[in-house]
Amino acid sequence: MHNSQNIPVILILSKIDLVSEEELEEFLNKFRKIFRDTISVFPISTQTNNGLTKLKQYINKKSVVISGPSGAGKSTLINTLIGEEILTTNDISEKTKKGRHTTIESRFFMPAPHSYIIDTPGFSTLDFPKLEEKKELEKLFPEFLEFIPDCKFRDCIHVNEPNCAIKENVENGNISKERYDFYLYSLENIRFSKYT
């Protein structure tokens, strides 16, 4: 989605102290294969301070919005970045095993001169941006972009068309099958304004 909105995005993987180094590396390898360095990844732990210096350097003198699902550790991260306990934090619910909403409105912080952090409420689902036609969906899949020019048909939507470079690259492993399946699911379930 970041490509369609021209918003630079980074991924902060919090709570890495809860997984093994092997699990983290496996995830990072999958992520890099999908996004091909179009999104920077910052694995961090607020418990061990692992990765926080690098993240602080990256966001220094920038305006950033912290967004993610409830229980991901956004408030704890912001408290750590600011250096004081400004935001309330909650544990994961034992009953639902999901995060509890701590932040109910967006809040603005200035941890250092010319550095701004906006805390947003947690979410449980993401909405796709409004797309006019099916062909636009491919732009939300960065791993498709280098192969699209190789499709035989300019209007290929990568489903049933012959000589589709996307389908060929799924078959030969250059594009993740899971991501391609998600693309197909999205193609079927998104309302495109041109067709409604």
Image (spheres, rainbow, N blue to C red):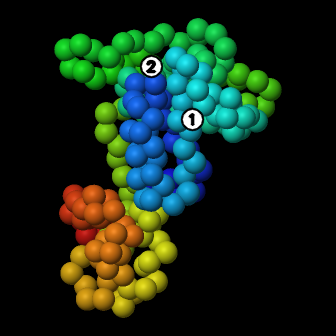
- Residue under the point 19% across and 14% down: 95
- Residue under the point 46% across and 29% down: 16
Q: Which mark is residue 65?
A: 1
* Residue 196: quadrant of the picture: bottom left
Q: Which residue in the structure is indicated by mark 2? A: 103
- The furthest residue to the front: 22
Secondary structure state at the residue bearing disc 1: strand
Instruction: Tell me if residue 191 comes above or below residue 164 in the rendering.
Output: above
Kind of residue sitting beneath label 2 = Thr
| Upstream in sequence: badge 1 or badge 2 | 1
Q: Can residue 106 be seen at all in this image of the molecule?
A: no
Is residue 61 or residue 12 the one in the foreground?
12
Kind of residue sitting beneath label 1 = Val
Instruction: Tell me if residue 64 comes above or below residue 28 in the rendering.
Output: above
- Residue under the point 76% across and 35% down: 61
- Residue under the point 60% across and 31% down: 51
Secondary structure state at the residue bearing disc 2: loop
Instruction: Tell me if residue 97 comes above or below residue 66 in the rendering.
Output: above
Characterize the local packing of mark 2: few (<14), some (14-19) or many (20 or more) Cα atoms within 10 angstroms: some
Q: How many numbered circles are shown?
A: 2
Q: Residue 142 in the image: x percent, y percent? A: 46, 63
